[in-house]
Amino acid sequence: MNTLIPEVSVWYQDVVSGNLFEIVAYDEDSGTVEYQMLDGELGEYDITIWEQLYLNTAEPPEDWRGPFELNPEDRAYSDQTMIPENFSGALSDIEPDSLDLGDDFQIY
C-alpha cells in the first residue's frame, strides 16, 4: 500500500508497470490526483486508487520535456513581443459614408 502524499511537480514511478509520471495537480477537497506521463498523456487518479498503487519517488528523466519541445520555426517568435509600427492600420484611412436612417437619425 502506498503511503506517499501526492506532491505537484514531483515525479513518481509505478513499481508494477515501470511507468514514470509527474503530478500536475492535487485537489484534496475532491480527492483527485492529476498526472502527466512522460509521453505527455494526462490522467487522473482518485485518492483511494492512489493509495493502492505501488510507487516510488523518482528523478525527472533527462528527456522529460521531449514531447513539449518546439521546433525551430515555432521557437523563432515565442519569447518576443511583436508590436506593429502603426496600430491604426489601413482601416483608419477610410472615410465612413453617411448612413441616412430617416429624419430623426443620421450616422456620420
Image (cartoon, rainbow, N blue to C red):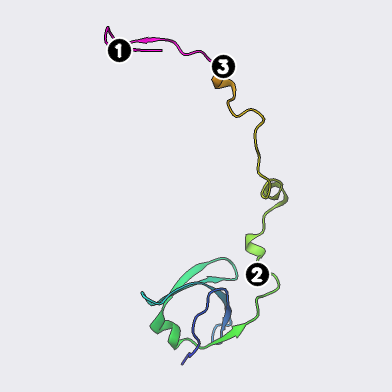
Choose mark 1 or mark 2, whichever is in front.
1
Q: Which residue is labeled 1 in the image?
A: 105
Residue assigned mark 2: 64
Picture coordinates of residue 22, whole percent (x, y): 56, 74
Check disc 3 and give the amino acid type: Asp
Q: How far apart are marks 3 and 1 (CA)?
A: 25 Å
User: Which span of residues is magenta-colored?
Assistant: 93-108
Q: Distance between the residues labelled 1 and 2?
A: 64 Å
Q: Nearer the N terminus, badge 2 or badge 3? A: 2
Cα gap from disc 2 to disc 3, whole angstroms: 51 Å
Q: Main secondary structure of the magenta part?
A: loop
Q: With 104 as the anchor, is 70 left or right in this view?
A: right
User: Which residue is located at x 56 percent, y 16 percent?
Assistant: 93
Q: Does the magenta stretch include residue 18?
A: no
SS assignment at label 3: helix
**Residue designated by label 3:** 93
Q: Are marks 3 and 1 in contact (CB under 8 Å)?
A: no
Tag 2 secondary structure? loop
Residue 9 figure quarter? bottom right
Q: Where is residue 53 in the image (x, y as percent from the top left)?
A: 47, 86
Seen from the viewer's position, the closer of residues 104 and 50 is: 104
Q: Do the residues labelled 2 and 3 touch (CB within 8 Å)?
A: no
